[in-house]
Image (cartoon, rainbow, N blue to C red):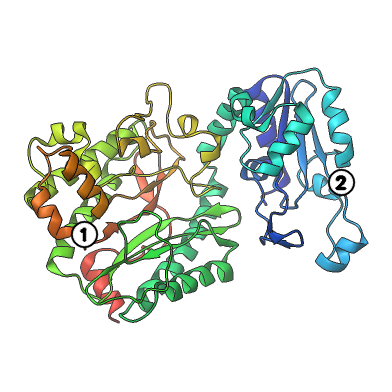
Amino acid sequence: MFDKETYIRRRAELKRLVGSGIILLPGNNDSPANYPANSYAPMRQDSTFLYYFGLHREGLFAVIDVDNDQDMLFGDDIDIDDIVWMGFVPSVAELAAQVGVSKTAPMANLKSQISNLKSRVHFLPPYRHDTKIQLMDLLGIHPSQQKEAASTALINAVVKMRSTKEPQEIEAIERACEVGYQMHTTAQRLIRPGVTERYIGGQVDGIARSLAQGVSFATIFSQHGEIMHGNPSAAKLEEGRLALCDAGCELDDYCSDHTRTMPVSGRFSQRQLEIYSIVEQCHDYVLQVAKPGVKYMDVHFAVCRMMTDRLKELGLMKGDTDEAVRAGAHAMFLPHGLGHMMGMDVHDMEGLGQVYVGFDDDTRPNLDQFGTNCLRMGRRLQEGFVVTDEPGIYFIPHLIDLWRKEQHCAEFLNFELLEQYKDFGGIRIEDDLLITADGCRFLGAKRIPYHPKELEEFMLQ
């Protein structure tokens, strides 16, 4: 939690941007894992609620009356049964006072309070089923219609504010990156033939739970790096293969997100090094060109052209580079975007709608082309944005087979040579990038080893 004035100032700016009406910001409730008393722990508060109210307790609901310049917090005080099992929690009024809110009421008063207000009601697209039911009860809008009924004015206001990180937010992300360093270097030290993916994934998660609030997303650790979200399995690491670790933590309500790809043996083979060096070059290129005013979509496609040129040198691609990228041939190897916004959410604000978060009036998503349709971030960069830089090259056997059968982009792809790479896996390198006044920099005081020689030396210590 930041100081009280931070939340007062944020709510005042939100009211100014929205202009009029009533803003509803529901907090999250406990989420049962497999029976009511066994909930996922710790409870994760809604990020937008946290941004404007900073309170982690479950069962809260905020109402901001823009027209009357009034902030209200609804929730029920805990009773002695709760105290016995969970410990003492301050009253709703005491919690509200911590963030500059003077008016509170029990949750039972929420519906009557809203029904008495005649102004336009603004709410964000809900993503949890209990919140959808709550909104249906309050507003009479069926869950299937709530996404369309959500307020564009409120979405745009929240995106505008949360996209540009304040200095204290950047400091929080830096702290999360420090834990991310510990997570990834722990994995790098443990990787060796015979150790299971699950063991290393568990050690990575343990660091996050020991030094932070926990992981910022389910840890990806797999020898099948060609699977974008490959969860750790019981498989043992094998000599000669690559292991991909994509992991981050959440600390002080802000996230880190890094990816490294390591040779299980501790040294890259020549074939692995050839592909790895392309990803390394693309990753480092972003640091040179990302700056305010530049479209991240343009950076993405510049990386795609660089990758295509290098793959042509290896004989895996062919033909005119610009034509190949326009046709989407590069998506055989890079079926996702270069990066995404990051902050309180590891995919920051993605639940509000990617068209609002990752794009702007002159940069629109292309949903019709494979690969490009997964571009989460394309808009013009601004000072204070935090985005990920995560190029990758993947050899996906089923995708190779499908495109070869259909002869899709056959004029740009060497399918005969691709057959020899079906057992390769995938490589991704990812860091978190802060857009500064005149360029950008990676976040985190320490850089997780990724340059080949440095990485090999670190792993073989």
Instruction: State the image coordinates of residue 417 (x, y, percent, origin top left).
Output: 9, 54
Please name the amino acid that badge 2 sits on.
Ala
Residue 394 in view of the camera: no
Q: Is residue 361 above or below residue 103?
A: above
Q: Quadrant of residue 140?
A: top right
The tally of labels here is 2
Residue sitting at the far front:
405
Dot 1: what SS?
Answer: helix
Q: Is residue 362 above or below residue 343?
A: above
Q: Is residue 454 above or below residue 74?
A: below
Q: Residues within 10 Å of mark 1 (few under 14, many from 20)?
A: many
Task: Answer with left or right where residue 186 lies relative to residue 313.
Answer: right
Q: Residue at x 33, y 44 (%)?
A: 336
Sequence-wise, which precedes: disc 1 or disc 2?
2
Task: Answer with left or right where residue 436 lies relative to residue 153.
Answer: left
Q: Which residue is mark 1?
A: 276
Question: Which one is nearer the viewer's eye here, 379 or 150?
Answer: 150
Residue sitting at the far right:
80
Q: Residue at x 7, y 50 (%)?
A: 313
Please name the amino acid that badge 1 sits on.
Tyr
Instruction: State the image coordinates of residue 376 (x, y, percent, origin top left).
Output: 40, 38
- The residues tagged by marks 1 and 2 sit, at their Cα atoms, a distance apart of 55 Å
Task: Answer with left or right where residue 103 lies relative to residue 328.
Answer: right
Q: Which mark is residue 9?
A: none
Question: Which one is nearer the viewer's eye here, 377 or 264?
Answer: 264
Q: Quadrant of residue 258?
A: bottom left
Q: Quadrant of the C terminus?
A: bottom left
Q: Residue at x 45, y 70 (%)?
A: 201
Q: Which residue is mark 2?
A: 93
Instruction: State the image coordinates of residue 437 (x, y, percent, origin top left).
Output: 40, 38
